Amino acid sequence: MIRLEKVSKRYPNGHYGLVDVSLTIRRGEFLFLVGPSGAGKSSLIRLLYREESASQGEVFVDQFKLSSLRRSQVARLRRQLGVVFQDVKLLPQRTVYQNVAFAMEAVGASTRDIHKRVPQVLELVGLSRSRDNYPHQLSGGEQQRVGIARALVNNPIYIIADEPTGNLDPETARDIMKLFVEINRRGATVIMATHAKDIVNQMQRRVVAIEQGRIVRDEVRGVYGYES
Ligand SMILES: Nc1ncnc2c1ncn2[C@@H]1O[C@H](COP(=O)(O)OP(=O)(O)OP(=O)(O)O)[C@@H](O)[C@H]1O
Ligand SMILES: [Mg+2]
């Protein structure tokens, strides 16, 4: 379970990313974070994987209390989290396979486990046949699939995505969204910040809307609720 208790985030320049936010996300949920540009969605996401720390309040991710984590625990926390960004940032000199394998090497997985697991996730994201391609040989949607495979490969409990379909055409965006649905169906909790109005409206999942750093709406089967 993820819990934010009266969390505020004030940046060094005095801007507030979040103001007094309380939120509980249970295991297995699929949750959209929506809101206008500058509302605080990315700020919330960065707090979850401890890219940033809360200025006030407390964030809990399962057994981790994020304000008091030692460095070694930050590494353990991040192993529970798969993070997907709009801008995928693959390693250009490595193949699809190597990019995904790299995420396992980084956490000290054995070669044997890597050989077993990487083909499984490439299969899941539909990239088995592109395993030996380099990033520049892939479409934007395929690159995003590699990003998702990389986020999934260590079997995280939570998948956190910040506008993962932001750079994609509507049809590709829909395919990527189906992939997140499948990932959720297999048990991972999915938390996604998005401006994809049509997809949010269609999916009827939990929607948490943020405006000016505050939660203004939290609906079990929600809608996007903004013009886009
Ligand atoms: N590193 C930073 N330093 C200072 N202010 C920041 C920083 N990051 C975000 N902010 C401010 O925090 C507020 C929330 O920004 P955030 O990036 O979380 O919004 P967002 O909802 O993700 O927007 P978008 O939909 O455009 O991605 C904005 O006022 C922004 O200017
Ligand atoms: Mg953002």
Image (cartoon, rainbow, N blue to C red):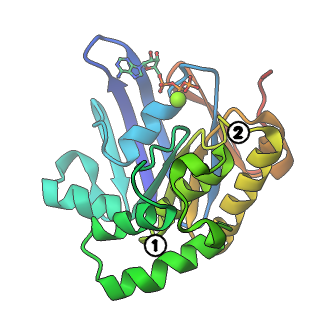
Quarter of the image holding residue 216? top right
Toward the viewer: 40 or 135?
A: 135
Q: Which mark is residue 168?
A: 2
The image shows residue 40 at horizontal and vertical percentages of 50, 27
Is 73 placed above or below 101 here?
above
- The amino acid beneath tag 1 is Asn
Among numbered discs 2 and 1, the one appearing first in the sequence:
1
Where in the figure is residue 117, as x and y percent of width and height? Answer: 47, 81
Question: Which residue position is annotated with label 1?
Answer: 155
Q: Nearer the viewer, residue 170 or 46?
A: 170
Report whether 16 appears left or right of 73: right
How far across and how far down the image is residue 141, in percent?
A: 67, 48
Looking at the rendered image, the quarter that the C terminus falls into is top right
Does 31 sit above or below residue 213?
below
Rendered view: 72 above or below 195: below
Nearer the observer, 26 or 136? 136
Quarter of the image for residue 162 reads top right
Can residue 9 be seen by looking at this rendering? yes
Q: Please tell me whether residue 37 is drawn above or below residue 94 in the rendered image.
A: above
Specify the amino acid type for callout 2. Leu
Which percent across, then down, holds residue 68?
17, 49
Residue at 30 percent across and 20 percent down: it is 11
Q: Is residue 216 left or right of residue 27?
A: right
The label nearer to you, 2 versus 1, is: 2
What is the number of the mark on residue 45? none
Q: Residue at x 50, y 62 (%)?
A: 96
